[in-house]
Image: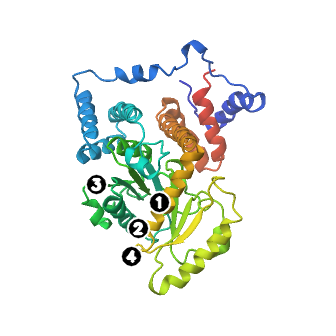
Amino acid sequence: MLKVTSFRYLSVIYTRHCYPLLFNNGCNLQQRNNSSSFKTEQFSKYLKNTFETNSYENRTIEKLFNGICSKRRSSLAEAITLVESNHEVKKKMSQVLLQLVLQKLKTDGSNEKLKRLVPNCVSSSLRIGITGPPGAGKSLFIEKFGMYLTCDVGLKVAVLAVDPSSKRTGGSLLGDKTRMSMLSVEPNAYVRPSPSSGELGGVARNTMEAIQLCEGAGYDVIIVETVGVGQSEVAVGDMTDIFALIIPPAGGDELQGLKRGIIENCDIIMVNKSDGDLIIPARKIQTEYTSALKFIPRKHKVWRPRVSRISALTNTGIAESWKTMMSLFEVLNSSGIFLQQRREQTRAWMWSHLRNSLEERFKNNPLVKTNLPVIMEGIEKGEIPPGLASDILVDLTFNKN
C-alpha cells in the first residue's frame, strides 16, 4: 500500500501521477470490454439473489411490499424509514423493495382518478414541489390545500416535509406534522416529516425513493415541502412535475424577481398572506413579479409561469391554485414534456446518488485513510492548497502504477 510519509513526498507523487493526467489527458484505469457491460435484463437477476428466501431480510421485504400494495400507512412509514437508513444491509433491502414497487407501478399504468381530471394523463401520480423562504406559510398552505384535495376533489394525498438538520448536533425538529394537525389525521392523507441530514437543495437524500413508495401505496398527489430555502436551492425541481414557490408579501422588489435560480425554475408563484392589511403589499409584489418574469426565459415553452395571490389563513385562492396546476398538468401531458421531464429527473437523481456513493466509498478507502493525516497536516500548516490536496488523494486512489 502506498503511504505518504511527508509533505515533500506529496510533490513527488503529484508530479509523477497527476501531470500525465492533466497534460496528456490520459487515464490509467483499465478499460472494460463490451462483454462485461451491464445489460438491462440483468437488473432483476442483480437483486434476485441478494438475500436467502427464508431470511429475515427477505421476509421483511415481502411484508412491506404486501403492505404497500394493500395501501397500509404503517407499512409505507416503515418502508420510508428503511430507504432513509444508512445501514449497509438495510440499504440493500430498500433497493430490492424499490425494484418491486417500480415493477408494480409499471404494471398498474396511469392513474384513473387523475385521468378523470386530465384525460391525457400518462402517469400514476402528480408530484408537486412546494418551496419558499422561512415564514412564508408553506405548511399552512399545504394543510389547507391537502384538505381541499382529499375532501373536495376526492384524491389521496401524501406530504413529504423536509426539515433542516442541525450541523452541530445532527438533529431535526420535525414539527411539520404538528403544524398539519388536521391533514395528519385525515384517512386519505399521509404526512411524513424527514430530516435533510445535511443535504443541500432543500430536500433529503432519499426523497425521490420516498415519492416512489408513496406512489406504490396508491397516493394520487405527492407534495414535497422543502426546508426554508434561498435562491439557489432548487433540487426539488428535479423530482417533481410542478414546482411552486410561495413568498410572503414582503418578498422583495422587481429586481429580486429578476434574479436567477429559484425564480426561473418555478412554474407557479403564489403570494401568500394576502389578507387584512397585507392585501395591498401582496398586490404590489404580484405585479412586480409578473413584470419580472417577462424578462426570464421560460422553463417550458408551452407554459408561462403565473403569479397569484392566496391566503392560506382564509382559504382564499386554494381552489384556483389547483385549477392552475391542472392546466399546467394537462399542457405537460399533451405536449410530451411530462414524460421527458420524468426521464431527465430520473437521470439527475442517479447521478446524485452516484456522487454520494463515491464520496462515501472514497472516505472509507484504506489508501485515503492512510494518507489523509499527512495531507491534512499540510493543509493546516498552509503548505498545500486544499484543491491540490484533493487532486493528490484522487490520484493516489485511482492510479495504481
Give how far across and how far down residue 37 sits, in percent: 55, 18
10 Å crowding of disc 1: few (<14), some (14-19), many (20+): many
Q: CA distance from mark 2 to mark 1?
A: 10 Å
Q: Is there a contact, CB below 8 Å, between mark 2 and mark 1?
A: yes
Looking at the image, is mark 4 or mark 3 earlier in the sequence? Answer: 3
Q: CA distance from mark 4 to mark 3?
A: 22 Å
Q: CA distance from mark 2 to mark 4?
A: 8 Å
Q: Residue furthest top?
A: 35
Q: Which residue is mark 4?
A: 313
Give how far across and how far down residue 394 sits, in percent: 60, 34
Query: In this rendering, would 153 be left or right of 345?
Result: left
Q: Residue at x 35, y 57 (%)?
A: 171
Q: Which residue is mark 3?
A: 188
> If the image is split into quadrants, where does the C terminus sit?
top right
Q: Is residue 198 visible?
A: no
Q: Nearer the viewer, mark 1 or mark 3?
A: 3
10 Å crowding of disc 2: few (<14), some (14-19), many (20+): many
Callout 2 amino acid: Phe
Q: Secondary structure at mark 4?
A: loop
Q: Quadrant of residue 105?
A: top left
Looking at the image, is mark 2 or mark 4 earlier in the sequence? Answer: 2
Callout 1 amino acid: Ile
Looking at the image, is mark 4 or mark 1 earlier in the sequence? Answer: 1
Looking at the image, is mark 3 or mark 2 earlier in the sequence? Answer: 2
Q: Which residue is mark 2?
A: 141
